[in-house]
Structure formats: structure tokens, C-alpha cells
Amino acid sequence: MTMIVALLLASARAIAGEDPAAAAAALTEGSMPDDAAKPLVQGKCMLCHTGDYLTQQRLNEGQWQKTVEKMRKFGAPASDEEVKIISAYLSKYWTQDAPPAKPVRAAAPPAPRPAR
């Protein structure tokens, strides 16, 4: 519980000094805002997902909680405390009210191999 409180306090301090325009720009670019929980999200979620995939989602707090719990059932190595911290971070930045993410361009498929 102490870890959660420390991370939430650090997050609040980080947001208080954050430029809102810069934060909004980071969200549309697919960047992850600096926050005490960011390394945890990177370490647990980005084992399987790219930052682009993660930051394109727009969910409410309950949906993020269910999504993170589902990922844990699929094998994400996160404790109960870490699930709460990850869900809080994601639901703070990628809500349904967040600006839309810029589309990510997929890589072109490889050229067909010549027939022999």
C-alpha cells in the first residue's frame, strides 16, 4: 500500500508542473507522459505491446482496470498493487476524452519473390 501512495503522490507532483499543451501533444504523438508509474507500465505492458498500440487506446477507468486484469490472466507479470498503479496511469492519460491518437502507418509488405 505504501508503494501505491508514493507513486500516486509522485504522479500528482509531476502533473502539477506539466505543461498541458505539451501533455496533449505527447498523447496525440503516442508518447507516454513522464510519471512515476511510467517505468512500471513500460516494464510490464511493453513486454508484449508497443507504445503505439498502448497509447492508441481510449478507455474509461473501469475498462482499463478490466484490460489490465485480462492481460494478467494472459500471463503479464503484475501483482495486485502493480495492476492498480498501471490502471491508474493508463486511465489518467488515455481516457475517452483524450485527443485522438495519430494513426500509425504500417510497414509495407515485402516485395513478392520472383517465380523460378
Image: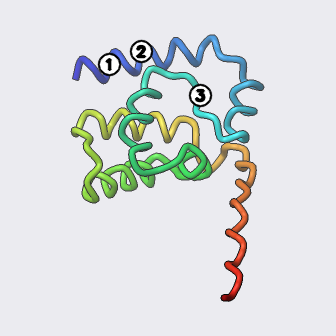
CB atoms of marks 2 and 1 within 8 Å: yes
Task: Tell me residue 39's x, y (percent).
Answer: 43, 27
Q: Nearer the viewer, mark 2 or mark 3?
A: 3
At horizontal 36% and vertical 32% (from top left) the residue drawn is 85
Q: Which residue occupies the foreground of this view, 72 or 107?
A: 107
Please, what is the three-letter code of the amino acid marked with disc 1?
Val
At horizontal 25% and vertical 43% (from top left) the residue drawn is 77
For label 3, the SS is loop
For label 1, the SS is helix
Is 112 on the left-hand or right-hand side of 9?
A: right
Q: Which residue occupies the foreground of this view, 43 or 88?
A: 43
Q: CA distance from mark 2 to mark 1?
A: 6 Å
Q: Earlier in the sequence, mark 1 or mark 3?
A: 1
For label 2, the SS is helix
Please, what is the three-letter code of the amino acid marked with disc 3?
Pro
Q: Which residue occupies the foreground of this view, 84 or 103?
A: 103
Q: Which quarter of the figure is the N terminus placed in?
A: top left
At horizontal 38% and vertical 20% (from top left) the residue drawn is 7
Q: According to the image, label 3 marks what residue?
A: 33
Task: For label 3, count other residues whose C-alpha is less than 10 Å away and answer few (under 14), some (14-19) or many (20+).
Answer: some
Is 54 on the left-hand or right-hand side of 5?
A: right
Q: Which quarter of the figure is the C terminus placed in?
A: bottom right
Residue 58, visible in the rendered structure: no
Q: According to the image, label 2 marks what residue?
A: 9
Q: According to the image, label 1 marks what residue?
A: 5
Q: Earlier in the sequence, mark 2 or mark 3?
A: 2
**Compared with residue 53, is residue 85 higher up or lower down, i.e. above or below?**
above
Q: CA distance from mark 2 to mark 3?
A: 16 Å
Task: Tell me residue 67's x, y (percent).
Answer: 39, 55
